Image (tube, rainbow, N blue to C red):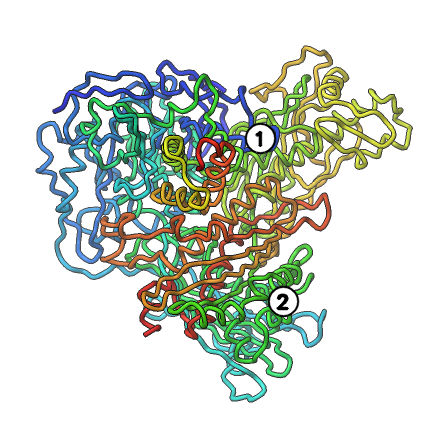
């Protein structure tokens, strides 16, 4: 058993006693009711379950939750899809995904939003050359499976968000 | 819309149980914080200005939308705790099932309830006919009918026990088997033969056709799966005539005729999983006090799911029979046909009934989804095509299809017939003989999946067409153009396609595209400059029907005095943006994008008082004539969302409801505001009115804003809401109604209206329907029963070009660029049409190059398949910057929309295969064409 304490979208949760083998995905969805993080495969192949982990050094990365035990996230600070919009207003990236019609069924969208957000934050610290932009987006998003869209509009939206604020994201 | 423990409006009664179905729209502001970023519909409706879907904000902020999102605590009035269930499934279908061993589940892991076949028998549970090839649980002492056949249901009070138990049961299997019996044999799910011999001159009646003679089935089967057709007899009954003409056609193809090129090829396709991202699940609660069963499921067929559950429990004993079943229909994380008519709602219902007073959730993980989810049928096809060498015209075509339907019948017979009647694609062939048989096997059940038999047959056909063109040294597009079915041409069933055929336009677009024009140059350049890379270009063009031949639609539209628009529809959302499509189709008629669109609203149409009887696919003319004398009778009340029905069919009822409101509410109000008298000729020129930015305009008069017109309509007691039902059997049912003293005729068969109350403070956006007044139809014209013989009537066309690069050393394929062009009438949500074409392209890539599964013991029925084994396309498999999509504009501004969600996937597959031939000189006759296969031919 593990005593679980975690910060999710800026809010502290716990302490809660959890089994060591409880997956993070089940902790979010069954224990906390945070079902914005989806379950797709249980093998970290589709990444509809991915959340953002914010590290103490200021870096962030996504992590799958379906096969990673919740205890591996103990003490961490994470962001889920529920934490992106503020005061009812969607983030720039969320708005772009909507306006570009980037998703259809929407089940993979949480994973794409989290991954895209991490990419934006990374580029804000270390901008990418324009010539490398498409490859950078592809490398960032390629782990995510979408069955409905063919990926094109997700990539277009990502590119447009970056280029709309090129001073920030593009070197 | 807040759902409370209200009294559900009774939709109908089935098996003595009251049924109702509604969309799962629950309270928007629950007590806990999970919704903190859900702004709710009021704050931003991206569809209102066309910059997004109506459900866009909810989806991008992680709102609870899908069946798998809901737990008991989310559901008003339900007990708070969610219990969890799991199905134990057989992984052996050749030995007798002798029982399950749960001894490893001891102590806290012990299930609270175990349900087996014996329990179902004791409770008097029935299997609905659609699923009745097998027991819901394989009884002890029988051999499971198919791999993945459930044998027991385990229910756990608490999640932790359930979670630990499922880990403990993972391996080895807890299912025990005894004597070897071999696989269970049952009769084929369907077999048909379609023969047509055209008249000797254009326009002459057919010599023989399915439309004239009916559909032909075999007299009997040999060895349970080989059809034996009637002995040939030109003067005999219809099936004997079919044999006579069919054998003539085949003899002609077999004859050694130097004037005729005959190609005789075998082609086979693979088993495919829809792989929608959200595994199937549901949660249900049976309250024994009120005897009400509530389910939350995500299905494409809400009416069928509810009726099936009612049948399941309709004869049950005592506490196992509810008095009321209410199905809440959630959004779906993908469908593609795989959520149409599935067994999941039945098991969800059983979980609740056998664990009363406690909500129970049943959810597949991905292994279980692969093990139990509906698959695309694998086809084995032998096709023969005869082409006149001098003219390049196809003279005859014969094919035999064999489909593996897996365990349960599901839609196997229908997939077989759609595949057979699509076998000659977009071509005009005067002599056709196609037989099809779909048999049972122990594989996982195959059923409805995007394309419904046509990805298989049209891939085989378009590869054959390309080969014929090459053999005749004809340009492949010119060969297609020469043989394309023209407008009003007869299909192989003997009926004409409805509407203008635009294959010539699509072919012209393909022919003139740089990908096609530059193909020789690009291939040569690669040979000279890019060592180790082979370049090829491929083309394919298909049409695909939309609709099933029995498509019903329900909708209501309401306009408030403030001009606020509310739409309710029975269609369900699985990513196709049907809600946005509804809003846009209505907006063209009544001036504004809806503020609220509620789907899966099957029970919101009680005022129509609809009744139905018979099977809409097989009812006789006499039975239909008799039944339709009842002004409330319709051939079908509500249909599944499938078969590319969304755009043309599912939006039709809302469109017609909007027309009634405009004609009898908004238009008279506008005339009042403009001061146009009833006797003025302009009073009847409603067709000249146009909406622009929520203002109604006619030439020469100042535009009127929607709010003013709506307020006036309410004040003068005009029609401000309408509720409509429509039915289509390859044409719309047409009926007349008396409204405001006029006879109004429209393509609908039921109508109820609500008028303004005469005051500016009339209720707006009402969520109840108790003031709708049903109008009796004064005449009815239902499409005749003979239309049941039609194979394809409505069709859309799509063509695709692909340029590929193959790395000789490894066999890996890269799609360098591609172009898809389609026509679909009036696109209701253009961005979504483009998105469907992009997504369809990806799915085509998957079927062509990546996706496959063995059928039997090594396949997903063994419970060991996941995305590590089943490879679906990723972004790197797509020409992200090189995929050009074009949608042809409608021929006329008021053209209706046409279904397109399936057609846009199909030509991608043969275009890729034809490109592979162009690059390598090797023509593959099976799917998928994997990297290993390519490497093998490139040695």
Dot 1: within a 10 Å radius of its alpha carbon, few (fewer than 14), some, or many (20 or more) residues?
many
Badge nearest the viewer, 2 or 1: 1
The chain identifier of the residue carrying mark 2 reads B
Query: x, y percentage for residue B669?
Result: 78, 22
Residue sticking out furthest to the front: A171
Dot 2: within a 10 Å radius of its alpha carbon, few (fewer than 14), some, or many (20 or more) residues?
many
Sequence-first tag of 2 and 1: 1
Disc 1 target residue: B47
Left or right: B307, with B121 as reference point: right
The image quarter containing residue A82 is top left
Query: x, y percentage for residue B803?
Result: 49, 62
- At 11% from the left edge and 27% from the top edge, which residue is drawn? B108
Cβ atoms under marks 2 and 1 closer than 8 Å: no
Query: x, y percentage for residue A121?
Result: 38, 30
Query: x, y percentage for residue B27?
Result: 44, 18
Disc 2 target residue: B484
The chain identifier of the residue carrying mark 1 reads B
Q: Tally the marks.
A: 2
């Amino acid at each position: 058993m593990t005593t679980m304490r975690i910060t999710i979208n800026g809010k502290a949760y716990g302490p809660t006693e959890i089994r060591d083998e409880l997956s993070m995905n089940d902790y979010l969805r069954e224990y906390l009711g945070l079902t914005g993080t989806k379950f797709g495969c249980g093998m970290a192949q589709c990444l509809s379950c991915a959340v953002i982990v914010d590290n103490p050094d200021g870096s962030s990365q996504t992590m799958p939750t379906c096969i990673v035990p919740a205890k591996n996230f103990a003490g961490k600070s994470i962001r889920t899809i529920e934490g992106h919009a503020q005061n009812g207003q969607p983030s720039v990236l969320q708005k772009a995904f909507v306006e570009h019609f980037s998703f259809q069924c929407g089940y993979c969208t949480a994973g794409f939003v989290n991954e895209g957000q991490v990419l934006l934050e990374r580029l804000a610290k270390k901008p990418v050359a324009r010539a490398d932009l498409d490859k950078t987006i592809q490398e960032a998003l390629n782990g995510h499976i979408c069955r409905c869209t063919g990926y094109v509009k997700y990539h277009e939206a990502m590119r447009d968000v970056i280029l709309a604020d090129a001073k920030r994201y593009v070197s | 819309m807040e759902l409370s423990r209200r009294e559900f409006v009774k939709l109908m009664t089935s098996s003595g149980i009251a049924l109702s179905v509604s969309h799962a729209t629950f309270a928007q502001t629950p007590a806990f914080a999970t919704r903190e970023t859900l702004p709710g519909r009021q704050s931003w409706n991206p569809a209102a200005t066309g910059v997004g879907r109506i459900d866009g904000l909810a989806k991008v902020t992680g709102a609870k939308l899908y069946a798998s999102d809901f737990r008991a605590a989310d559901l008003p009035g339900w007990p708070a705790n969610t219990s969890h269930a799991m199905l134990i499934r057989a992984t052996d279908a050749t030995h007798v099932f002798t029982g399950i061993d749960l001894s490893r589940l001891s102590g806290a892991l012990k299930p609270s309830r175990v349900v087996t076949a014996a329990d179902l028998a004791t409770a008097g549970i029935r299997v609905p006919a659609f699923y009745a090839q097998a027991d819901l649980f394989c009884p002890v002492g029988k051999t499971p009918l198919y791999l993945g056949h459930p044998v027991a249901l385990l229910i756990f009070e608490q999640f932790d026990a359930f979670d630990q138990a499922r880990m403990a049961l993972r391996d080895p299997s807890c299912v025990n088997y005894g004597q070897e019996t071999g696989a269970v044999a049952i009769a084929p799910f369907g077999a048909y033969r379609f023969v047509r011999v055209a008249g000797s001159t254009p326009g002459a009646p057919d010599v023989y056709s399915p439309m004239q003679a009916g559909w032909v089935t075999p007299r009997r089967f040999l060895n349970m799966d080989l059809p034996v057709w009637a002995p040939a007899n030109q003067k005999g009954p219809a099936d004997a005539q079919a044999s006579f003409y069919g054998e003539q056609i085949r003899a002609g193809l077999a004859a050694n005729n130097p004037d005729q090129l005959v190609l005789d090829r075998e082609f086979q396709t693979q088993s495919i999983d829809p792989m929608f991202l959200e595994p199937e699940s549901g949660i249900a609660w049976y309250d024994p006090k009120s005897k009400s069963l509530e389910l939350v499921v995500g299905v494409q067929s809400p009416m069928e799911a509810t009726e099936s559950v009612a049948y399941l429990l309709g004869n049950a004993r005592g506490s196992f029979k509810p008095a009321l079943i209410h199905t809440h229909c959630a959004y779906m994380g993908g469908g593609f046909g795989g959520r149409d008519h599935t067994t999941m709602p039945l098991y969800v219902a059983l979980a609740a009934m056998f664990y009363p007073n406690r909500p129970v959730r049943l959810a597949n993980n991905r292994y279980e989804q692969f093990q139990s989810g509906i698959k695309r049928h694998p086809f084995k096809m032998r096709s023969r095509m005869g082409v006149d060498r001098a003219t390049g015209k196809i003279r005859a075509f014969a094919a035999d299809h064999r489909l593996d339907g897996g365990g349960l019948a599901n839609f196997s017979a229908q997939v077989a017939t759609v595949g057979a009647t699509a076998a000659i694609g977009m071509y005009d062939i005067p002599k056709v003989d196609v037989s099809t048989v779909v048999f049972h096997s122990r594989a996982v059940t195959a059923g409805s999946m995007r394309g419904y038999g046509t990805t298989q047959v049209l891939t085989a056909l378009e590869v054959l067409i390309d080969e014929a063109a090459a053999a005749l040294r004809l340009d492949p597009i010119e060969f297609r153009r020469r043989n394309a079915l023209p407008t009003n041409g007869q299909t192989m069933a003997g009926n004409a396609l409805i509407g203008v055929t635009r294959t010539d336009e699509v072919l012209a677009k393909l022919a003139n595209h740089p990908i096609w024009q530059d193909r020789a140059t690009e291939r040569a350049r690669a040979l000279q400059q890019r060592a180790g890379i082979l370049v090829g270009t491929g083309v394919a063009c298909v049409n695909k029907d939309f609709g099933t031949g029995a498509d019903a639609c329900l909708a209501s539209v309401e306009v408030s005095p403030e001009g606020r628009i509310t739409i309710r529809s029975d269609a369900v959302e699985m990513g196709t943006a049907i809600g946005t499509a509804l809003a846009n189709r209505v907006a063209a008629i009544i001036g504004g994008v809806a503020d609220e669109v509620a789907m899966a609203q099957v029970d919101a149409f009680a005022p129509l008082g609809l009744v139905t009887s018979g099977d809409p696919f097989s009812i006789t003319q006499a039975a239909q004539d008799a039944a339709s004398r009842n002004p409330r009778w319709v051939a079908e009340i509500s249909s599944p969302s499938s078969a590319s029905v969304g755009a043309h069919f599912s939006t039709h009822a809302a469109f017609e409801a909007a027309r009634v409101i405009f004609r009898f509410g908004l238009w008279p109000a506008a005339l009042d505001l403009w001061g146009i008298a009833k006797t003025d000729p302009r009073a009847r020129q409603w067709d000249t009115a146009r909406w622009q930015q929520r203002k109604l305009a006619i030439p020469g008069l100042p535009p009127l804003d929607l709010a003013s017109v709506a307020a006036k309509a309410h004040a003068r007691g005009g029609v401000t809401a309408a509720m409509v039902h429509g039915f289509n059997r390859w044409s719309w049912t047409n009926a007349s109604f008396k409204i405001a003293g006029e006879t109004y005729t429209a393509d609908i068969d039921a109508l109820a209206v609500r008028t303004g109350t005469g005051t500016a403070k009339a209720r707006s956006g009402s969520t109840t329907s108790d003031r709708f007044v049903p109008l009796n139809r004064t005449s009815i014209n239902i499409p005749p029963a003979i239309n049941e013989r039609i194979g394809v009537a409505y069709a859309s066309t799509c063509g695709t070009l692909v340029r590929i690069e193959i790395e000789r050393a490894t066999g890996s394929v890269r799609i360098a660029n591609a172009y898809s062009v389609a026509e679909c009438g009036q696109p209701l949500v253009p961005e979504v049409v483009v998105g469907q074409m992009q997504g369809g392209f990806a799915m085509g890539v998957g079927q062509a190059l990546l996706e496959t599964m063995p059928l039997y013991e090594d396949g997903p029925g063994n419970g060991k398949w996941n995305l590590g084994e089943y490879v679906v396309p990723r972004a790197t498999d797509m020409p992200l910057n090189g995929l050009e999509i074009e949608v042809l504009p409608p021929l006329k501004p008021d053209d209706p929309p046409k279904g397109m969600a399936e057609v846009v996937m199909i030509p991608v597959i043969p275009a890729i295969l034809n490109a592979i031939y162009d690059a390598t000189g090797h023509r593959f006759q099976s799917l998928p064409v994997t990297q290993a296969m390519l490497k093998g031919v490139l040695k």
